Structure formats: C-alpha cells, structure tokens
Image: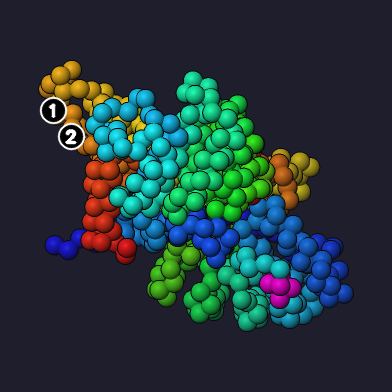
Amino acid sequence: MFIIGELINGMYANIAEALKKKDKSIVQECALEQIQAGADALDVNCGPASKNAASDIQWLVEAIQEVTDKPIALDSSKPQVIESGLKAIKNPVIINSTTSDPEKLEVLVPLAKQYKAKLIGLTISAKGIPQNKDQRLELAANIVAFCADCAFPIEDLYLDPIVLPVNVAQSQMNDILEAIKEFKIISQPSPKTIVGLSNVSQGTCVRALINRTFLTMAAAFGLDAAILDPKDKDLMDALSTAELILNKQIYCDSYLDAYRRK
Amino acid sequence: MATELALEKWPGQVSTVQIGATKKEGGSRAQTISVGGQASLPCLFKEGVLPNRPVIAFEIWDIQPSDWPDELINPYKDVSGDPLAWAEKCVNSYQAQIVALRLQGTHTDFGDKNAEVSAKLVNRLIEAVAAPLIILGSGDDAKDNLVLPACSQAARSQRCLIGSAVQDNYKTLTAAALADGHNIIAESPIDINIAKQLNILISDMGLPLERIVINPTIGALGYGLEYAYSIMERARLAALAGDKTLACPFIAFVGQESWRAKEARSATSEFPGLGSESERGIIWETLTAAALIQAGADILVMRHPKAIDNIRKYIDNLWTNEGQG
C-alpha cells in the first residue's frame, strides 16, 4: 500500500511552532522520521492557524525537499494554496485534493496535468457529505468523467470515499468499504483508492485500535493508498501482516523488518 | 491483424551484481562481468530493459571428479586431475567467461583437503587465468567455514562470487565476503520464504543486497525443473513489484543437476530405448539450461562444452533477434 505520512500539519503543535519560528529542522526531522517508519510520500498541510498559507506551504515544501526526494502531497481545500505549493515543487507531487464540484475540478485537474501531479478526488460536493455507497459512486463517476474529458491519466487519480468517524456514522462503514472496491470498476484503467485514515476514529477513546482494524479491512477491499501516521508501529505492522495474508508480499520470518525497510 | 502487446511497467528492478575486478579496480581479472539489472520478466525484450545477457560459468573441480560419466569427463580427460590446466583449457580452448572452482576435495568424504592447500590453489588459479572466478565450497558446513574464509582472503580484491551461504550457516562466509570485497551466493532449498529470510539475515550483517546472488536450487529437466521455475518466477515478480529483499540475480547449477539425471548419465546398454549416451547428457544439460534462462537464470554453471556451445548460440539467437543485446 502506498503510505502518505500525515504528520506535517500545522494543526500539530510542533509544526505550528516550526512555521512560527521558521525552524526548518523540526519539519525536516518530522519528514525523515516518517520516511524511516515506512512513508512513501509526505502530506503537507499548513493547518488552520496559518495566516498566509500560500507562502507557508512553499516554505514547508522547500524545507522537506532539502532532505528527501520522496513525493509530497500538497494538502489544502484552497486551490490557490495548492497552486502556490506547486510553484515550489521539485519532488514528485500529489494534489490533495479536489472535490466533485466543477469549480474545483476546473482549476485542479488542469493544474495536475500541467505539473504531472497525481490527484486525490474526494467524493464530496458542495451539497454535502455522501450518505451511502451510491452517492459516493455517483460523485466518483463525476470526477472520473471530468478527468477523462481533460485527458488526465485515470491511473493517477486517487478516489477517497470519505471516511466518517465510526461513532458518528456507524451505519455507513460497510458502504465506505464497498465503495473502495466498486470505485475500481468505474473505468478501465481503474482509478486508485485512498482514505484519510484517522478520521475513522475521531472522538473515540481507542483510536489506534480502530484505525488499524479499519485499515486492514480496507486493505482487504483493495485500498491502494492511505494517509496515516506511519510512526504508529502497531498500525504499520498490522498493515504489513494484512498484505501478507492478501498475498501482496512474500512471507519470511522477518517479514515485518523487510516491510519496514522496503 | 496486428497484435498489440500488453506491456507491464514495473516499479522495481533486479540489482546488478559485478563479478571480477580488473587491474584498475584493484584486482587482476581481464574483465568485469555484470549480471542482473532487469526491469521486466525474463526475455520480454519489449517490456523493460534487460541490460545483461545470461552468462555461463565453466565448473571445474579441485580433484578428479569420481562420479562424472565418461561422456562428460571425456572433453576434460587430459586435464581433470589438474585444476589449473583444467581452468586454462576452459578459458583458452572454450573461451570461458567465468570459471567456477568447486572445492569438492575439501569435503571429509572426498579427500579432506585443508584450508591452506585450497587457498594456495586459489592463489595459483588467479595467476593462471584472468577470467572472473566463482569459488564454491563442498557443502560440508564445518569444512566450508574453515576453507572458504581462507580462499576468500587468498582472492582478496578480485571481487569473486563465493558460496554458498545457507540459512543455518551464513555468518562466517558473509564476514569473509565483506572483509575481502566479494559477492556471495545465498542458497535456499527451493523455498522462496527461506530465500527472502536468508537475504535479510545476510544484509543485516552489512553485506549490501546488491552483492547477493540467489541460488534458488534447481532441479534438472524431469527432476523438479518446474518447481524451480515457479519459485524463480515468484521471486522475480516480487522483485519487479518492488521487494528489494528478493531483487537479486539467480545462479543455477545446471551441470550438477543435469548430469545427475538417469537419462543423462546411463549407458546405452542399460537403457537402449533412450538413445545414444554420447548425445543424451548434452541434450539434458542444454534443455535444462534453456528452460532456466526462460525462468530468469542470470548465471548458469555448466559442465559439458557442447552443451555450453548450444546455450551460447541459444542466448545469441534470443538476444540478437529479439532484444537490445
């Protein structure tokens, strides 16, 4: 599974402080620790407190690029912040994210094409959060169709079914898992699938357990990528074991070590 | 109707292992041979780069082989008691690219030669031929742990390929290969899980994965070839999908396995229906090698010069007609 580390986010105190003091070393350490723990890419989000996200995101990107050439996911709901981040990008890049709304798609899909970026598409629109599998599929199909019309490569599109907290939307969990599987049959070649994992456990008191249980189940439904905390060792070990059981990696006695150093 | 090839793009690549150090690199080999480096499944020339052709190593022994049938020993009859002359004949008469010295005589059942004698032989072999070398123990773990480190040291800086490390006995050999700048053969008993585990254990000692060659253990035609094939295919698929712990080139002991087959070694009088013994063994070794090239073998350790000649032509044909070679 393609792992995007979620820890470079201004909502965390250390990154907020780094942004405030313009201390690159905190960001760089956080980047390297996540890669060491198994991240294939790094999510970058300035956080809600950032007053000038357009320049903050550039500063974060530049700090990270000094220590790694791993892909960077530019995470903002504002297209102009993403566009600003793209101007500073040298590493491979992922746009996180567009919704199904035309005004987002019309800006972000051409940008993704221009910068050869992968694109995360949230199955959500201005009308609100989808309430079942069919609404998710409809929104997904809309994003896929838009991308196809723009000749954006569908295999670079990552569809997110919108994971809701289990304590809020328990009845939707099965629909979310099934959507992961069914997104694949929207087109050929298939779009990829992604989740922002930690949302599933928001507000619960056993967050780590819920996160890793959901992730292993999602893996079994064919999930391609996840945004998560790679430093959660139990989570990464559970994922590695799930991939073993799904025959996606070859067993050996040290398979956990082998996965960690992939 | 034109057929469109379905081409796969793989994220992983097999590592490239270099065998033999030239004078410039601190050794005295005439050339360096590179193996591995593939970015696609074997012989899919249109799919991804296949930068190196399979190479053939001539197997020679430090003693007169007692169990080689007449047809196999005949080409080497004049030299088979003398490993230096044998090596020279392989290089000079048969243009061997690599010489693989098996120290069978160090085995307690085959003469029990000691480490010092073997190290001296390796020294003299380095003087006698300039081809890159493979140095093989006898498979007696305790003896190999004495003999191979001495030979490794004797061949220091020549960047040989030394083997074999096995799951229960890899530390001594790995330490020697690390100290003396050699590559190592990691042998597993037709078992991909052990192959992967052993590579991890060896690399944990500090020897890079890029200096490991996997001996997956093969069976000859009719004797488990298809099991070896499936293990090699699985390892290669994992490697191309990005599993670095399995992304090593393969070495296949084709001669050893082929000439154990009844069909290769029996006298015509014993099995008249099988045809002439002067042809059977060569055919068996040739077919086993050809199938293993299709399975992804990078180094073929072979014995009969005629079989080797057949396989050279086979490789030339395949690479010249199909590939980039």
Q: Chain of mark 2?
A: B
Q: Which residue is located at x 87 percent, y 74 percent?
A: A21
Mark 1 crowdedness (10 Å alpha carbons): few <14, some 14-19, many ≥20: few
Prevailing SS of the magenta stretch: helix
CA distance for labels 2 and 1: 8 Å
Q: Position of residue B233 (x, y in %)?
A: 39, 43
Q: Which residue is located at x 62 percent, y 39 percent?
A: B149
Residue that carries the numbered disc 2 in the rendered image: B279
Task: Say what amino acid the circle numbered 2 marks.
Answer: Glu
Tag 1's secondary structure? loop
Instruction: Kindly indicate whether the residue at mark 1 contacts the one at mark 2 (C-beta within 8 angstroms).
Output: yes
Q: Which residue is located at x 79 percent, y 42 percent?
A: A205
Q: Residue furthest top?
A: B270
Where is the C terminus of chain B found, in terms of image quarters? bottom left
Question: Which of the two residues, B7 or A125, is positioned nearer the viewer here?
Answer: B7
Which of the 4 quarters of the picture holds residue B297?
A: top left
Above or below B162: residue A153:
below
Instruction: Tell me the magenta residue range.
Output: A62-66
Task: Say what amino acid the circle numbered 1 marks.
Answer: Gly
Question: Which of the two residues, B222 or B44, is positioned nearer the viewer here?
Answer: B222
Where is the N terminus of chain B found, in terms of image quarters? bottom left
Using residue A77 as the reference point, say whether residue A60 is left or right of it: right
